[in-house]
Image (spheres, rainbow, N blue to C red):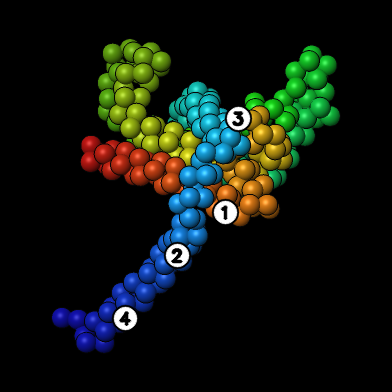
Amino acid sequence: MRSTSAAARDTALVTASVILAAIFVLFVAGALVALVLRVAPAALVAALASPLVDQALWLSLKTSTLAALVAALFGTPLAAVLSRPFRGRTTLETLVTLPVVLPPVVGGFALLLLFGRAGLLGHELDLAGIHVAFTTAAVVMAQTFVAAPLYIAVATSAFARADVRQIEAAATLRAGTAYTFARVILPPALPALAAGLTLAWARALGEFGATITFAGNLPGVTQTMPVAVYMAAQTDLQGAIAVAVVLMALSYAALLIVRHMAGGTAARL
């Protein structure tokens, strides 16, 4: 039987943990509640009815969806490669994950130095009549740069959990690599891939630093919702808060979808 002093230490540790957890929850919830309480319903309706906000909203939804699809198109095969051991895997995985921890402004600046008119590739593209920086395409590229690593990380983890016995059975039956991936590895990973795609979409929707650095702030062309919040905050605080609340609601809904998908995947496993 444990001593009374050990039980007291356990109780104190649990109490301290609960207090620390509660403080952090209040810290996050307090900031979000303050944001919601500061916006008047009339200001929210007026912001949503504004043509400028309407343009920014639809542009954000369009570009973030395209960014998520690009992440899935290029990230799925990359994740399949990273899910298997090979020499240099850690280096490659670190490189792919770097945009997650890199300041978004630095990422946007790097893209500008690559695709800008005076950039590494931008000069040749400019001679060919192709202009990337400060266009809607630049918004998608900036969002993909910061959001794709999240999808790739989830997809890599999902592919790594593939049933080795089924893979070996497919190999015994002389199934090709493409067939094994499409029929054995991919189907069980689809719920996790959908969750990763939703997470990447939410990250792309909220991207600001790389977007404004590489794509700028052109209404209807590159002014996404986060950029609109930043610009509106300088002249119309209520409008900025209203747009921020809309962004928060969309992000929260996306996270709920991710949690639901993750819960369903865990139940199946």
Q: Is residue 107 above or below residue 138?
A: below
**Mark 4–mark 2 distance (CA, rounded to whole Å):** 26 Å
Compare marks 4 and 1 and give the one earlier in the sequence.
Answer: 4
List the residue tagged with mark 3. 140
Residue at x 50% of width, y 60% of height: 38
Q: Which mark is residue 84?
A: none
Residue at the (27%, 28%) spot, across then down: 165
Contact between labelled residues 2 and 4, with CB atoms less than 8 Å apart: no
Mark 3 residue type? Val
The image quadrant of residue 145 is: top right
Quadrant of the frame with the C terminus: top left
Q: Which mark is residue 30?
A: 2
Q: Considering the numbered disc 3 on the image, is that residue within a helix, a strand or a loop?
A: helix
Q: Which residue is mark 1?
A: 238
The answer to whether residue 138 shows anywhere in this view is yes
Q: Earlier in the sequence, mark 2 or mark 1?
A: 2
Closer to the chain start, of discs 4 and 3, is 4
